[in-house]
Every structure is written in C-alpha cells, then in structure tokens.
Image: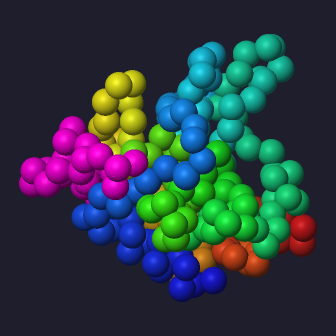
Amino acid sequence: MQSSVLVAFAFLTSPVLCANVKVHHHPMKFREVTIIKDNAICPNGGTVLMCQSASYACQDDGTGTNKCLPRDNSFLDSINNKTRMPWTECDAKTSSKCLFDFECICMDYQNVNCYCQPPDAWRTERKIAKSCTTSSGIENTCDTGKYCRTKGSTQECAPAPYLPTTTSLYSDCSNDGKCDTGLTCKDYDNFAICVNNGETSR
C-alpha cells in the first residue's frame, strides 16, 4: 500500500508532473474541472465540480440550492479492492475506480503508468502544451503542486486538487498514518484514509 503512494507522491513532486500526463485512452470529451470553495454555491453547467476540500461535495442544502457541504460518509461503504485515491496508481485494464470524481488516466496508449487524476488532464504525449510552463520556463509541464489541464480551447497550469500532502478528513494517510486531531487513519485494501474516530468500525 505504501509503495504505490510513494510512487504517486514522487510523481506529484517531480517537475514532470504534467509532462507525462495523458487522458484515458477511450475517445471522450475533456470534462473541465471547476473548484468551488467550501460552503459556496455550486453553479449549474457542464463542468466537473469539485469542492475545495475532499471532505465536501456539491449537494442540495435543503432549499433546492446546491452548495459545497460536508460530504456524506456513505461513500466509505462502497470502497473495495478496485478503489484508488486521487493521484495514486490505477489500472485502466481492470476498471479501477478513483474517488472524488477523479479518473484513471494513462500516460500512453498501452495503458501502463496510469494514475487517478482530474478528468481535464492534458494529453501531453500527443501534443506539446506550450501554455503549460514552469516558473523557470520549461514547456509542457507545471510547477510542483499543479497539473496541466485543458481550459476551453487551450491549456493551463492549475492547482492540483486533493494532493496527498494534507492530514484533513478523507485525505490519503497511507504514507505516514498522520491525520488531524479527532481523525484516525483507516486502512483499506489499496490505501489508508483519514476518517472520523467514530467511523473506524465501519
């Protein structure tokens, strides 16, 4: 479990974070990701809406308005041996299921070296994204903590959501087992995740 997370973390902290990212091999439209602040209104539209924190999700607030509100923990019951956390290795050939609206995206046409990533990650091995550059001017890649994504008719470096570097609720704790006070690092088949203390018996 730790080895896959270490590989994924190295992938994220490497200057080639988005230099080798390719979207899933099936023909599909880019699904643009929009990050919404926690407790803010989720707009209508065709984008993939992700709340700022992994522990929040767009849902009805009881008045017919969708907002980023605390995520229901029922998703924990659906985790199985095919489930993967964001930014960790996945297997497109065995239908890996990525949490939090991430998709199993492969770097090449052979479907190897695949990772759970946002669905708008750019196909950088098909064509160089000159508008994705690091602060030092390297093209087709982004600075640490960002990823190259499609934005409209072009590409850009955007903050990478749900990085495995936090200790908050529903963060990946596979590497060091650390979670915020009141949370416990719970083991699953392929990873460990920070959950509320009362959820460890689920």
In-image side of 139 versus 157 (left or right): left
| Magenta highlight on residue 143 | yes
Main secondary structure found in the magenta portion? loop
The residue stretch that appears in magenta: 123-144
In-image side of 171 versus 132 (left or right): right
Residue 64 sits above or below residue 194 on the image: above
Residue 22 sits above or below residue 62 on the image: below
What residue occupies the far left of the structure in this picture? Answer: 136
Specify whether residue 112 is in view.
yes
Q: Quadrant of residue 43?
A: top right
| Magenta highlight on residue 134 | yes
Residue 133 sits above or below residue 11 on the image: above
Q: Residue at x 29, y 46 (%)?
A: 127
How many numbered tags mark residues here? 0
- Residue 174: x, y in percent? 60, 77
In-image side of 100 versus 147 (left or right): right
Q: Relative to the observer, which residue lies in front, 150 or 198?
A: 150
Q: Quadrant of residue 199?
A: bottom right
Q: Residue at x 81, y 63 (%)?
A: 79
Q: Residue at x 67, y 66 (%)?
A: 93
Question: Is the image coloured rainbow, by chain, by secondary structure, or in one colour?
Answer: rainbow
Quadrant of the snapshot with the C terminus: bottom right
Q: Residue at x 76, y 78 (%)?
A: 189
- Residue 73: x, y in percent? 81, 52
